[in-house]
Amino acid sequence: GQNIDQPTEMTATEGAIVQINCTYQTSGFNGLFWYQQHAGEAPTFLSYNVLDGLEEKGRFSSFLSRSKGYSYLLLKELQMKDSASYLCAVRDSRGSTLGRLYFGRGTQLTVWP
Amino acid sequence: NAGVTQTPKFRVLKTGQSMTLLCAQDMNHEYMYWYRQDPGMGLRLIHYSVGEGTTAKGEVPDGYNVSRLKKQNFLLGLESAAPSQTSVYFCASRPRVAGGTYEQYFGPGTRLTVT
């Protein structure tokens, strides 16, 4: 089965740095996604990690450690518009369910001025 | 290029009624997915399709049926709606190989209430 865990809520102030953690226990692993979802809107893709290490994309970075079943999303120079839910999702590697995504419950980030 | 669109955006049903949610994509994607999102539960896969004419069950398929008669369309049907099916439904699609990222592109969602 798939078990993906991330904090329910986090708060931070504008201009600060925040790290959102995601831990997973899966039967088959073939990559980890981070999506951003503003209230009432569709999830939008932020990052994809399949190998260990840090992927940087502007203000957002994502890290993966496959041996530890751990990822984090790092948001720098926080802006009010970063207030959203951040979804961690694991891609399955098993034949019968290859490519399917399993989502965590999301972390609601609130950025205060 | 509209991406992924969903019809309708909102719907209220009475218990026992039926309806069909339509998902359309204009990106020529092979894979299409239907998810439901409930408070505190995250996104859960209902059904998916790896190509025209093929469908498969996801994590929570009971009470739903799907069809993929055309590559660009993926329909989700509720034959006899129940209050437990009150949710926000998202459709997503992706190409067979998405440049290595396997990113799924999501539609805007359909908010369904069953009374």
Image (spheres, coloured by chain):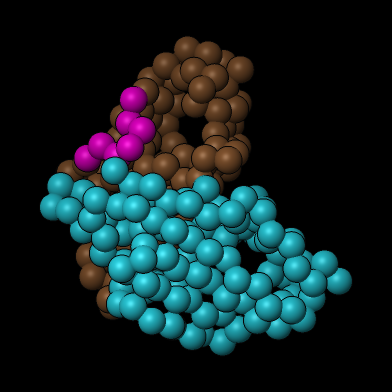
Relative to A103, residue A73 above or below: below
With respect to residue A88, does A80 lie above or below? Answer: below
Image position of A95 with respect to A72: above or below: above
Q: Where's residue B29, x and y in %?
A: 29, 62
Label tally: 0
Q: Residue furthest left?
A: A95
Queried whether the magenta region covers residue A57, the answer comes back as no
For the residue pair A86 and A39, the one nearer the viewer reads as: A86
Quarter occupied by the C terminus of chain B: top right
In the displayed structure image, the side of residue A43 where residue A91 appears, left or right: left
Helix, strand or loop: magenta stretch: loop
The picture places residue B109, in percent across and down from the top left corner, at 53, 47
Q: Residue at x 51, y 85 (%)?
A: A57
Identify whether A42 is placed above or below B99. Answer: above
Looking at the image, can residue B107 be seen? Answer: no
* Chain A drawing hue: cyan
Q: Position of residue B19 (x, y in %)?
A: 45, 26
- Residue A106 appears in view: yes
B41 or A64, which is in the foreground? A64
Q: Quadrant of the N terminus of chain B?
A: bottom left
The reply, left or right, for residue A82 in relation to residue A24 is right
Which segment did they paint magenta? B56-62
Q: Residue B58 colored magenta?
A: yes
Tint applied to chain B in the drawing: brown
- On the rendered structure, is B9 left or right of A16? left
Is residue A16 left or right of A106 when viewed as pictured? Answer: right
Residue beneath the point at 49% across and 18% down: B82
The residue drawn where x is 30% and y is 39% is B58
